[in-house]
Amino acid sequence: MKKIFSRPESLRDISTHYCSGCGHGIAHRLVAEVIDELKIRERVIAVAPVGCAVVAYDYWNFDCSEAAHGRALAVATAIKRVRPKNIVFTYQGDGDLAAIGANETIHAANRGENLSVIFINNAIYGMTGGQMAPTTLVGQKTATTQRGRAAQEHGHPLKISEMLGPLPGVKYVERVSLHSPQEVLKAKKAIKQAFQNQIGNIGFSLVEILSPCPTYWGLTPKKSLDWIRDVMVKEFPLGRIK
Amino acid sequence: MTEKIIIAGSGGQGVMLLGKVIAEAAMKENKFVTWLPCYGAEVRGGTAYCMVIVSNKGIGSPYVDKADSVIIMNSPSLAKFEGRLAKGGFLLINSSLVHAQIKTAKAKSYPFTEIAQACGNIKTANMVALGALIAHRNILKEKSCIEVMKETASSVKKELIEINISALKEGIRLK
Amino acid sequence: MKVLISGNEAIAEGAIQAGCSFYAGYPITPQNEIPAYMSVHMPQAGGVFIQAESELAAINMVYGASATGVRSMTSSSSPGVSLKQEGISYIAGAELPAVIVNIMRGGPGLGNIAPSQSDYFQATHGGGHGDYRLIVLAPATVQEAYDFMSLGFSLAEKYRNPAMILGDGMLAQMMEPINIKKSRIKNQKYARPWALTGCRGRKPNIVKSFYMQEGDLEKFNLHLQEKYKTIEAQEQRHEGLFLDDAEIVLVSYGSMSRIAKGAVQRLREKGKKVGLLRPVSLWPFPKKAFGQIRVHPGGRLKFLVIEMSYGQMLNDVKLALNCKYPVEFLGRAGGGIPTEDEIIKRTLSLLSR
């Protein structure tokens, strides 16, 4: 019998702690599959964020460093500079990358660091209990915007991918989604591109992944996917940004 | 022997360099030496100064509260540092730019800037002052100062080194 | 080789000669000569220099570089070091070796750029969050500024713990002749099996300070406490002068101790029985040295702590002495520096009492 599907070597045989319907499990697996396919597992050094994915290093089967909240790209910059032959990537949520770490994001991108960035946008802070993220949609209810995000008071969702696009150091930015099998496949392709860019010394590459958070969206897993498709992609259009 | 020196002037007069040449020359003579500059915001637009201590024994504080010698290269420096001269200390003044009545007994005024101009470069007024200092205070040998000039300026034009050396010699002759 | 060099340049050159391969920093006076020197000489030595976008980025870059096992450092001055505290806590929590240089300036707030010793509490009694300790060395001469970089890296690696070099604007800006080596250390003494290098031929390494399972973090903290006990037992450093017959011992560190030493020498010339105890390691605090000082038979013994702060080291001295002897204090901060004359006057008045 031919084996056509199995757990990637880059993923450990452990159940994740994520909520049912959470996108992190899919995103972790996509990263692991890409790393297996590119045969770079033994060269990879990952930088995990602070947020729900803080223990990503428990699930991945390669070298990982934790980083303080928002500082993943500073940590990754240094790792890549002192070990340019290793493949270094960060995996960060919206609070980590676009709020507390926005400065590190902008400057690592502007320096054109040869890194791959996996940016999980679920429009909310998960680990801390569902507070407003920089990417929270206008009108979206969160623990800190209980009557919905008001643009006048909280500003509009921050489109950091679009902001990074014009920087000369940035070589590749694409927004993808996990809301259907077809989109998941597109997401994997984009992740692969971001890693291939690093292998080819092309420069800073970022993949923004729209990812469901049923728990703090107050929706079922299925309805969460529909919400991405019907609502979230209107604010965060999918496709290649750069 | 311990000589505590304050050198003050305006930015561009080479007061920091003057202090460094003293420090390098003292090091050549195997003396103990410290050089402490004013730094940061103080430097911008104000009076530039440095403190140098040359000694036969180890030096404690590099900070000079009361100086054995004070070199004043411009007028504002006089007002600021005259009071820092130790009792019986030596005040050396650039009379080209300072036209004040000096009350201190052990004060000498020479037109360093004009002498430097005559040597061929106005910027060597600091070296004229250095010459005058070592002639009066006998803290360093002329030979060590010249060696330092040759080494620190080895990358610049030879001509400029010669002008600096002649400025130093003019200064020594002032005594 | 003997060279005339500033404290800042000596720190930078000392680090490079000690085999430091990574520097990240952000401009702040009075330590700007360190990054300027590093920007030229670090790449020449085959290392990496990064001018970071912030103090936060700089310390976290040091965390990242250190996680790969290379000798890494940053430098800053007081307000910048305050910003780095979170990162220092993470470095301590991940048990990474690194050297942090703090060239102290006047505080609080933006303060000024004058020499100061007002960050003693921050360096030795916390700073960042959690039960961690920093190894803190306080050079008093430009030669020590150079030598302590090598010592700092070696202690940091020996104990897998961040080390701080605590200086001030005076030490950093002054020039003094020093002896320098011209052979860069290539091989580090301590193995680094924990380093992130890619997991070829081994199990993956994880660098982290997060312990979610019940009991794990307490266990990790107990491990840290054991390590700190070892450091306290083995790494106390001090310099003593005329301690055998002293009736008054001046206690002072860093630049301030040079001024105190000048005062001691002048007082000895007058026949006064004055000594100096200079803590070289501020943590671990040299308690043993204090414990060894005995009152001269038929004599008396007092201590005078002198700082460019309002008594941040004072309590450590009292604790080290178990309150057995009177401890007096002389301090100025915010740009004020106790002078030799002030110290002598105070010492004489204490002797006459």
Image: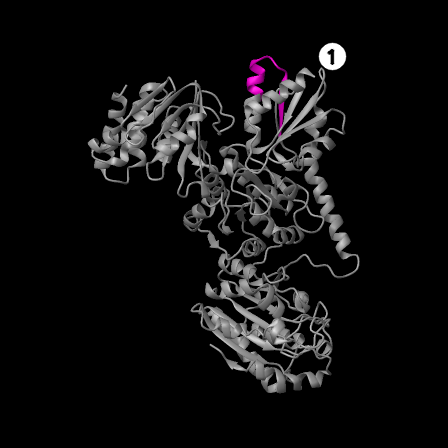
* Residue at figure coordinates x 71%, y 34% from the top left: C315
Quadrant of the image occupied by residue C334: top right
* Residue at figure coordinates x 39%, y 32% from the top left: B77
Q: Residue C59 location, x and y as percent?
A: 57, 53
Q: Residue C317 location, x and y as percent?
A: 70, 31
As drawn, is A161 to the left or to the right of C287? left
Above/below status of C103 relative to A240: above
**Mark 1, residue position:** C298
Asked whether residue C1 appears in the rendered view, the answer is no
* Residue at figure coordinates x 63%, y 40% from the top left: C120
Q: Which residues are magenta?
A: C264-279
Judging depth in this view, the residue of B107 and C26 nearest the camera is B107
Residue C276 magenta-highlighted: yes
Quadrant of the image occupied by residue B35: top left
Q: Secondary structure at mark 1?
A: loop
Above/below status of B6 relative to A82: above
Amino acid on which disc 1 is placed: Gly
User: Callout 1: residue from which chain?
Assistant: C
Q: Quadrant of the C terminus of chain C?
A: top right
